[in-house]
């Protein structure tokens, strides 16, 4: 890493920016599969209208704001790395690229929230969201520059606001000596110390204030001095906007531009809401849902098979470097694997007695840069998470734990860690995932145990021929179940459709890109009727009619 010096930064601000650099380097190294080194400078990136801006709101022990700025070419390349796309980068990022880039930055923020807690003086929360260019002047700037394997530049600019820089605690400040307890007077003035000084500095921060009759730039002390009447006007306007958003949410406009039943805003409020949500967008009638569903399925069905995730270092070479294997043993295991044409190389190390399962698991954790799970008691272990069993078996993974506070599922892999599959799971389940590595036998045993448990709301179809047939089956189930919402995505060789009916979910899996063993004439094709209990939602209650 090389660094060019610019304007001197305070010790606390320099430590904060260094922590972000380290976390960004760690996440990009994990995504790209190779070590990443940055050239660091304090110079701003050349400005462009197409630059991608992301605001990071800091909460908890600190309060403030910072931004990440990326050229559009850098954003597309990083999104393609996460999605494992091999196509040439487009000129403009797609919606999937923007979502993938935001998720990548959330991973950086997740690591930064943990590593920067000591600098912040306590636990902090970092919220990432796409935004426009900030109106405030930066107190500190750090530019990170590197190149990918093809030589293309990767640039990231970090900006810290004056409010956040002022809130950072000074690591060199000495703690004041404790004074003898003295009863405070009845009207004690506020103590004049570092906290009061920082608050006074915040009063001079320039803000963009929008008033009912126009807008102007004002310092914070002037905003606080606004009359009570002006604040009442602002509160009334916020209340009115809140009610307008609630009414719009209860009866939204159809998301299909060519919808023939589009109504004015107030006309929509006079009728009950009908229709369903697809990928978070509301469609008002069956024809609109079908049109949008077919468009989504055509895109997912046309996606090429996902390439296997690249390794950082070959497993055999890593174990030789650790002294667990010899070069001759690796050659012998590779020859046995080629003759059998089956099994993973780590499995052959165990079969031939060259290494233990614990050694292979530890090497896999080092190879993928993931933590290793400890041995668990099979009798007390209960898999969690709504991931269909078919997908778990395809990627040899087991959900270990769900943490509601962080909305995160911890998933153990027995072989390769597939970040593209994790990204698709996050989109469908609306949560975060955290990968780890477990023993191959532990994962296989748990999958076999899960296979014995009933899963009545998971349906798999292996005889569908094209996306139109998938759409016909999907729409049929949406009508029969009275689905309120549908989410779909591509996970490996499967199209996963997740239907929500009130508080219950049904998962449909369609295998694509697989040669069928036999064909079924279309005239004899029948959709299996779902088993519905007396309490299950039906079409009479449903939204699609």
Image (cartoon, rainbow, N blue to C red):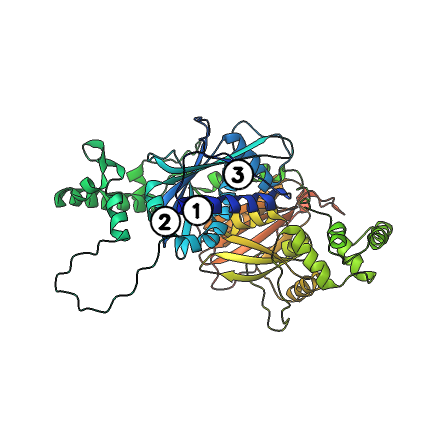
Label count reads 3
Instruction: Give the secondary structure at mark 2.
Output: loop
Measuring from the top left, give residue 434's x and y in whole percent.
Answer: 55, 54
Of the 4 image quadrants, the one containing the N terminus is: top right
Q: Are marks 2 and 1 in contact (CB under 8 Å)?
A: yes
Q: Is residue 395 visible?
A: no
**Separation of disc 1 and disc 3 at Cα?**
31 Å
Q: Is residue 136 visible?
A: yes
Pick the front one: 274 or 485 = 485
Instruction: Give the secondary structure at mark 1.
Output: helix
Label 2 vs label 3, nearer the camera: 2
Q: Are marks 2 and 3 in contact (CB under 8 Å)?
A: no
Measuring from the top left, give residue 386's x and y in whole percent.
Answer: 55, 58
Measuring from the top left, give residue 436's x and y in whole percent.
Answer: 61, 57
Q: Residues within 10 Å of mark 1 (few under 14, many from 20)?
A: many
Residue at position x 79%, y 58% from top? 349
Label 1 vs label 3, nearer the camera: 1
Instruction: Give the secondary structure at mark 3.
Output: helix
Determine which residue is flagged by label 2. 168
The answer to which of marks 2 and 1 sits earlier in the sequence is 1
Determine which residue is flagged by label 3. 96
Determine which residue is flagged by label 1. 16
């Amino acid at each position: 890493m090389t660094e060019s010096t610019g304007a001197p930064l305070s010790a606390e601000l320099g430590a904060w920016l260094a922590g972000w650099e380290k976390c960004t380097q760690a996440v990009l190294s994990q995504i790209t599969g190779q070590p990443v080194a940055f050239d660091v400078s304090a110079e701003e990136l050349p400005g462009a209208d197409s630059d991608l801006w992301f605001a990071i709101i800091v909460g908890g022990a600190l309060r403030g704001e910072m931004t990440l700025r990326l050229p559009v070419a850098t954003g597309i390349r990083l999104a393609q790395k996460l999605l494992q796309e091999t196509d040439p980068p487009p000129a403009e990022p797609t919606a999937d690229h923007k979502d993938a880039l935001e998720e990548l930055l959330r991973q950086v923020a997740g690591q930064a929230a943990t590593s920067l807690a000591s600098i912040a003086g306590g636990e902090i929360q970092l919220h990432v969201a796409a935004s426009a260019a900030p109106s405030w002047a930066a107190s500190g700037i750090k530019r990170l520059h590197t190149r990918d394997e093809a030589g293309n530049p990767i640039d990231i600019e970090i900006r810290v606001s004056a409010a956040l820089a002022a809130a950072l605690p000074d690591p060199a400040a000495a703690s004041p000596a404790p004074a003898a307890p003295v009863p405070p007077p009845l009207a004690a003035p506020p103590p004049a110390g570092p906290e009061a000084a920082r608050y006074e500095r915040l009063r001079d921060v320039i803000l963009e204030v929008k008033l009912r009759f126009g807008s102007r730039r004002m310092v914070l002390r002037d905003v606080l001095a606004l009359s009570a009447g002006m604040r009442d006007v602002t509160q009334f306007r916020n209340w009115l906007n809140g009610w307008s958003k609630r009414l719009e949410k209860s009866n939204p406009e159809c998301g299909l531009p060519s919808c023939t039943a589009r109504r004015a805003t107030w006309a929509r409020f006079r009728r009950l809401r009908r229709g369903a949500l697809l990928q978070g967008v509301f469609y008002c009638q069956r024809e609109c849902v079908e049109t949008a569903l077919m468009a989504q399925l055509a895109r997912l069905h046309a996606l090429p098979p996902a390439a296997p995730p690249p390794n950082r270092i070959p497993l055999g070479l890593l174990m030789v470097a650790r002294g667990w294997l010899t070069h001759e043993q690796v050659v012998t295991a590779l020859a046995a694997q080629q003759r059998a044409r089956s099994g993973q190389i780590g499995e052959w190390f165990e079969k031939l007695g060259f290494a233990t399962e614990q050694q292979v698991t530890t090497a896999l954790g080092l190879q993928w840069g993931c933590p290793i799970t400890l041995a668990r008691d099979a009798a007390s272990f209960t898999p969690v998470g709504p991931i269909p069993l078919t997908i778990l078996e395809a990627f040899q993974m087991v959900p270990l734990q769900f943490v509601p506070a962080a909305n995160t599922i911890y998933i153990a892999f027995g072989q390769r860690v597939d970040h593209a599959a994790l990204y698709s799971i996050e989109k469908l389940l609306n949560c975060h995932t955290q990968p780890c590595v477990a023993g191959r036998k532990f994962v296989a045993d748990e999958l076999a145990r899960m296979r014995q448990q009933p899963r009545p709301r998971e349906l798999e179809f292996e005889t569908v021929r094209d996306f139109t047939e998938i759409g016909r089956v999907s729409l049929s189930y949406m009508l029969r179940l009275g689905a309120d919402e549908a989410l779909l995505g591509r996970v490996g060789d499967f199209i996963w459709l997740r239907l929500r009916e009130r508080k219950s979910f049904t998962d449909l899996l369609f295998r694509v890109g697989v040669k069928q063993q036999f064909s079924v004439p279309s005239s004899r094709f029948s959709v299996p009727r779902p088993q519905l209990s007396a309490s299950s939602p039906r079409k009479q209650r449903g939204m699609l009619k």
